[in-house]
Amino acid sequence: MTENTRKIGNTLLRVDDITLSFGGVHALNGVSFEIKEHEILAIIGPNGAGKSSMLNVINGFYHPQKGTIAFEGRERKRMRPHVAAEQGIARTFQNIALFKGMSTLDNIMTGRMLKMKRSFLWQALYWGPALKEEIENREFCEKVIDFLEIQAIRKTPVGKLPYGLQKRVELGRALAAEPRLLLLDEPMAGMNVEEKEDMCRFILDVNDEFGTTIALIEHDMGVVMDISDRVVVLDYGRKIADGSPDAVRANGEVIDAYLGVSHE
Amino acid sequence: MLYDVLIAPFLDMADSPVFFAEVVIVGLLTGVMYSLVALGFVLIFKASGVFNFAQGVMVLFAALTLVGLMEHGVPTWLALILTVVIMVVLAYGIEWFMLRRLVNQEGIILFMATIGLSFVLQGLGETMWGSNVKALDIGIPDASFEVSGILLNEFDLFAAASGAVLVAVLAVFFHYTRIGRALRAVADDHQAALSVGIPLKTIWVIVWAVAGMVGLVAGIMWGAKSGVQFSLSLIALKALPVLILGGFTSVPGAIVGGLIIGVGEKVAEIYWGPLFGGAIENWFAYVLALVFLLFRPQGLFGERIIERV
Ligand SMILES: Nc1ncnc2c1ncn2[C@@H]1O[C@H](COP(=O)(O)OP(=O)(O)OP(=O)(O)O)[C@@H](O)[C@H]1O
Ligand SMILES: [Mg+2]
């Protein structure tokens, strides 16, 4: 890893004392942590720990009852999905959420939605500046497609693709937005070893080449140890550890959480 | 009897192919209007999951507004522009007063809201412009002429051509522009659409405005033929079998379905109508759609649904 391009910077996002419950279920309970610029942060924890809920709070799908979310220093009680997108937060979903009837290229083009500003009228005419804008953005998407090595499926409706490739297209859609912060919810779940290796390589390359800050949820400990700079551990909606992969691996409470032992 | 139903009508068709061609053409032209109305339904249903009961009344409202303005001495071109503007404003109003308040409610609640909307629109239209039957004449020639023995009508051709152009423009718009892509994205997956920053509310305004536009075109054609009056809104009843046939979410389904129903009911009326004492046009479309469903429950272009077990 080239240390110079991956220099970890200041705080990009800070969540503070986030508490979120659904009826009687406490999904998150006073969780605070930071994501620093250019780092790869892994969020881990057993099933139902609140990992996905945390991502949903960060990009505004869930609104916490308590706590604040500060992106680039701007503190909010709650995020809203379109504000998150405008601020440069892009994401993928645990259960793939692609536009199934649309081609790979069109799916990735939707990631450029906010980069395209031509007015409705120009677009209705599909002429002049709107056409130019469409072409420029398509070129960018072709770069994303090359980067992810999915040229062969450019025109295929994504509903017809195998699972592993769908995950890749979903990453492509997020990358097309040129995000400052990329949230990945179990990007490697359900993949075979080879697909996982590819996905790891893409994640590292994105971080390395574009300096994109990444927060990802992952169950595969091998992967987590390999690619993350820092690890946050959630268990029953609480944060139980936060540190380097090695420190977290050695942490007794984390081991217990994973083995289901009560620690006393 | 069996002979009368199964054989005689086909002999009639073979006897006079020119007349048969005329019947089919009239059917196709009617079908274009059904397609347009069904298209309005499909657009709204895809983008916002709302079954818009008021689609028929939107056709009436658009036509009433246009005629009303023209009766007040507004020149046709200006009246057309003003009507388009009013339909856009209406779309904003619907988003603001209805969709925004009811977001995340069950489909049936939104459906009920559109029933309410249809009464509001009808009342509004008639209050503003009166409820008498109005003739609509936007200056399209209405002469008939013959092509190799087949009698054609200029107005009908013009209507069919505008319908076709409208559909083609919409198809290009949906396929190749950012907003079109956003519309399809919203139709596919709301959450994912939100995550890439697609503004749902704007999309809703756009689909309702486009549905209003499509309604206006249908209203002009229909209204010019049979006058602008309340019964115009009943055209929506004809769109229902089209939707059963074409599927609620398929744009090509709406178009092809409309043409099939248009031709089917005309042919049935002419050749089988007398056997049933006439006027089978009104219910034949439903029978056609239901019979069709028996063989292809997924609709014309829908994929076969296989239940996961
Ligand atoms: N929309 C929701 N409505 C009700 N309960 C929810 C909702 N989302 C999450 N929960 C609950 O919150 C808790 C945390 O769920 P979450 O999905 O965040 O866990 P997770 O750590 O992502 O688990 P997994 O590893 O299985 O994905 C669970 O008990 C879950 O049932
Ligand atoms: Mg999860």
Image (cartoon, coloured by chain):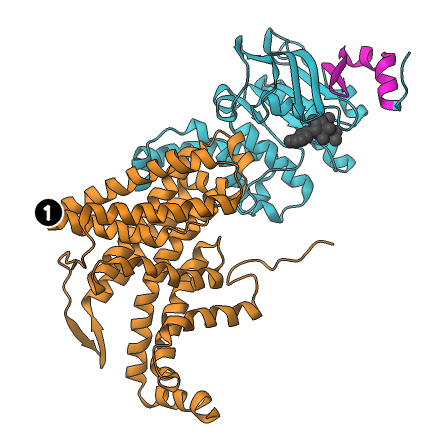
Chain colours: A cyan, B orange
Taking the spot 13% from the left edge, 58% from the top edge, the residue there is B139
Position of the C terminus of chain B, as image quadrant, is: bottom right
Taking the spot 71% from the left edge, 25% from the top edge, the residue there is A24
Residue B196 lies within the magenta run: no
Residue B267 lies left or right of residue B244; in this view the side is: left
Rendered location of residue B185, percent (x, y): 49, 40
In the displayed orientation, state which residue is furthest to the left: B73
Q: Quadrant of ligand 1?
A: top right
In the displayed orientation, state which residue is furthest to the top: A10
Rendered location of residue A148, percent (x, y): 61, 33
The image quadrant of residue A180 is top right
Residue B119 lies left or right of residue B250; in this view the side is: left
Magenta range: A229-258
Of A123 and B98, nearer the camera is B98
Q: Secondary structure at mark 1?
A: loop
Residue A181 lies left or right of residue B266; in this view the side is: right
The residue identified by callout 1 is B72
**Mark 1 Cα-neighbour bin, 10 Å: few <14, some 14–19, many ≥20:** few
Rendered location of residue B167, percent (x, y): 34, 54
Residue A245 lies within the magenta run: yes
The amino acid on which the numbered mark 1 sits, given as a three-letter code, is His
Taking the spot 15% from the left edge, 56% from the top edge, the residue there is B138
Residue A126 visible: no
Residue B137 visible: yes
Q: Chain of mark 1?
A: B
Instruction: Work out whether A12 lies above or below B161.
Output: above
